[in-house]
Amino acid sequence: MTWTPIINPMPSMILSILIALLPILTIFWALIIKKMKGHHASILATLVAFLIAFAVYQMPAKLAVLATLYGFIYGLFPICWIIINALFLFNLTVKSGSFIVIRHFIASITADRRLQVLLIAFSFGAFLEGTAGYGAPVAITAAMLAGLGFKPLYAAGICLIANTAPVAFGSVGIPISVLSQVSGLSETALSQMVGRTLPILSFVLPFYLITLLAGIKNTKAVFPAIFVSGISFALLQWFSSNYLGPTLPDIIAGVGSMLALILFLKYWQPKHIWHFEGEQTATVSAKKHYSKQQLLKAFSPFLLLTLFIILWGLSPIKSLLDQLGSIEISMPGLHQVLANDQGVPLSKIIRFNYLSTPGTAILIASLLSLPIIKFSFKAALSTYVATLLQLKYAILTISFIMGFAYLLNDSGITLTLAMAMANTGKLFPFFAPILGWLGVFITGSDTSSNALFGKLQYETASKIGVNPVVAVAANASGGVVGKMISPQSIAVAAAGGGLIGQESQLLRFTIKHSLILLFMISLLVFMQAYVWEWLVPTT
């Protein structure tokens, strides 16, 4: 016996849409208006979603509880497992004194806060997104900026906004691969289409970030450096996505733009070093010479992180690790009991791929770095416990948000909102990115959003006579700007930036920028559908 969700549970579709919006509006109300802590807001939103799923969508209470629990488990593993180990690695560099060397090295490249944002939040963050993903980039870069002396709110908020450009190609291109599988469209065509939309955002984003950080006047003062950062990233992202596929754009663009900016800064520096108001210039611009051996030692945790994440991303190694260490358990009472809106039973498998998950790669890199940075295992264990305590509320927030997301999806609430956008007719190309944005806001993942809405985008575009590649790719492109306001991402950034319990501040900081950039992408997609059709690759 299976249970099939109802897409239109109320007498009219408008009423169904209003009811379906309530759980999402609850999060905004709790964080923005009531200024609740993240874990309190996520628990409240889950309770509201449960009541609506049970009372309005007629989902059996047992299934609603199990669907929430299934998402809660996924939040703990692999998501929290990755984030815990990413922050543990960073904390090791701080506790061992290595981060002092890193801080001085970055200051030797530039002591200017504007340019440090481009190097760390934008370029290095993109590289981490391309290798690890799952929140690790924001956790590490926010912690790095905070460690450099950035105000915690700016450190976390800037890193959330900077993490938009690389998301669609994150984790070695998994979001595009999933989108291809779900929609049936060519992976190459989707990579090319996303690669003809996001480079525009990638070029604009450095200007946007620095204007947000320092104002227009101070942005003009470093225009050449911003241009080098943005244009190198955009061109490399465009080239790799169009000619090499979806696996390498973030890695190539992230490393390439970082090297381009470092090389440029050897020959050009701003006339005035910009720092935060009230910040002492001496502490910002202090430089100290370190030998290559000292630098290699200090950066060894991040170098090992890069090596192991790349190795873990290779298919043969990933397959071998899955064979050696992976457990699959059918979710009792849920597997093959829930169905999709077509009545097809859904597989609900709990996968503990404890060896092949990126979180394990990060942990191994951290442990192997201990003898290099001369840090004892006992001290590392103490640091790991401290990291767990640091993240305790973030873990609770992420786990409940994933339970919330799975409940919304399995009950049919998300499908109601998706069908509302699908019924916008010829305007649908404008709303296609908004659907992806909504999916990432709910699930915290572009991959999950693509799995959720990829087929719907394809079918809707086909019905209204728009090339499906445009709409399906728009799901990934629109999703990237939903990442900065997803409660899951907010919780990770708050943990990395030292703002746990202040998630409401972060959401208020990012939401306006998410909507501005979403509007820009929606316009681009609309133009691609009806005016710039020559931009669309052939399938």
Image (tube, rainbow, N blue to C red):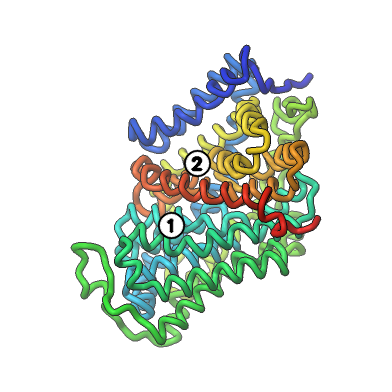
Label 2 Cα crowd, 10 Å radius (few <14 / some 14-19 / many 20+): many
Q: Is residue 40 left or right of residue 459?
A: left
Name the residue carrying label 1: 159
Q: Give coordinates of residue 412: x percent, y percent.
A: 65, 26
Is residue 274 positioned above or below 20 on the image?
below
Is residue 362 at least partly visible in the picture?
no
Is residue 260 at least partly visible in the picture?
yes
Q: Nearer the viewer, residue 476 or 88?
A: 476
Dividing the picture into quadrants, the one containing residue 91 is: bottom left
* Residue at (64% x, 33% y) in the render: 424
Q: Is residue 40 left or right of residue 419?
A: left
* Residue at (54% x, 73% y) in the render: 232
Q: Is residue 391 left or right of residue 536?
A: left
Q: Give coordinates of residue 5: x percent, y percent.
A: 69, 22
Q: Amino acid at mark 2?
A: Ile
Name the residue carrying label 2: 398
Label 1 Cα crowd, 10 Å radius (few <14 / some 14-19 / many 20+): many
Dividing the picture into quadrants, the one containing residue 284 is: bottom left
